Image (cartoon, rainbow, N blue to C red):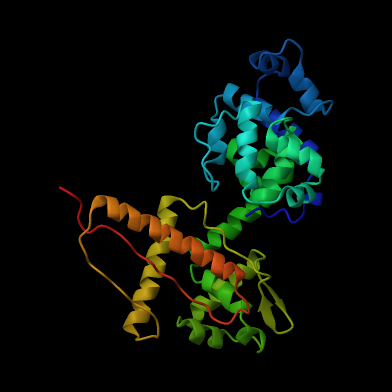
Amino acid sequence: MCTIDDMDDLDLDALSRDLVRALRGERSQTALSRRLGYTSNAVHNWESGRRAPAAYELFRIIERTGGDPVAAFARFPFDLDGAALTTPEGITTLLSMLRGSTRVGDLAARCGASRFTVSRWLSGRTSPRLPQLLALIEVCTLRLVDFVAAIVDPASIPQIAGPWRELQARRNVAFSHPWSQALLRVFETRAYRRRPHSDRWLADRLGVPVPEVVAARDVLAEVGLVRFERGRYVADEAVLDTTVATPEERKKLKLHWADAGRRALEEGREGLFSWAVFTLSEEDYRTLQQLHVAYMQRLYRLVGASAPAEVVALANVQLFALSGAD
């Protein structure tokens, strides 16, 4: 999740200029303009701020400098495979993906454009300029920092360098101290908020050693995900973003929470522990996989809307084939 706290903190015109400049690299402005098919020095106009490029021009630059436009969204929760982002039509497809189910009026208010303008973008009658596209990426996904980092070195972009370092530090917490995820959720509960902070109480609540609680608590405070206020820690609904984890990092977290479930079972904790071993067709197995995903999606929706915060729970759902078809 992006750590830029407010759209007002972003100078999107400057960010657009910096992106073009970083993608151009050692090439001259004239050389890149010609590579893009312009007889005039369009790149100079973009970098000087005289004119903002159309959104699709960014992806043309990425393509002409050896990159893959679609790869910029590889870690985003939608599939743009086959979308021609280097064309206005491709941008219309992208905007539809970004928008999701958000109402036009809400989207317009969040990105600072009129409802009429946003409607024209979504219908393909007009195409947004690059600063407007950047605004839409941020308000729709909160992952503008990830997008920028996917196409250029974030250290080369002044507005992004600091937030990127902060974002990486926050993401690393989940992998270096897996119990930090559970600790954040305990900080939200009414039971914790009604009492002075106690590491021993937290450790007993989670069933983990006190040193693990202390280490997780300290690193959460260090990266700014919690703060100590009036005798206890406040999380402000912080979330540890693990959506961009590497396969090895994701495996590590899965093993951690599988071990947590096993330990709860060994200790006889109250919970639902079920299993079934069965035979079924490959087609029905694929259906079960879809049901598994649908269950987790519904779980996230229910949790997101649930109040008050009273129980910290772990859903450890597994489905895998013990043997394949011959």
* Residue in the picture at 46% in, 73% down: 314
Q: Quadrant of residue 237?
A: bottom right
Residue furthest right as drawn: 50
Residue 41, percent from left and from top? 76, 15
Looking at the picture, tell me which residue is in the foreground, 5 or 88. 88
Q: Quadrant of the N terminus?
A: bottom right
200 up-or-down from 157: above or below: below
* Residue in the picture at 61% in, 26% down: 86
Residue 257, percent from left and from top? 41, 69
Q: Is residue 297 left or right of residue 149?
A: left
Residue 221, percent from left and from top? 64, 70
Residue 251 shows in the view: no
* Residue in the picture at 58% in, 72% down: 184
Looking at the picture, tell me which residue is in the foreground, 219 or 312. 312
Q: Quadrant of residue 311?
A: bottom right
Residue furthest top as drawn: 39
Looking at the picture, tell me which residue is in the foreground, 220 or 72. 72
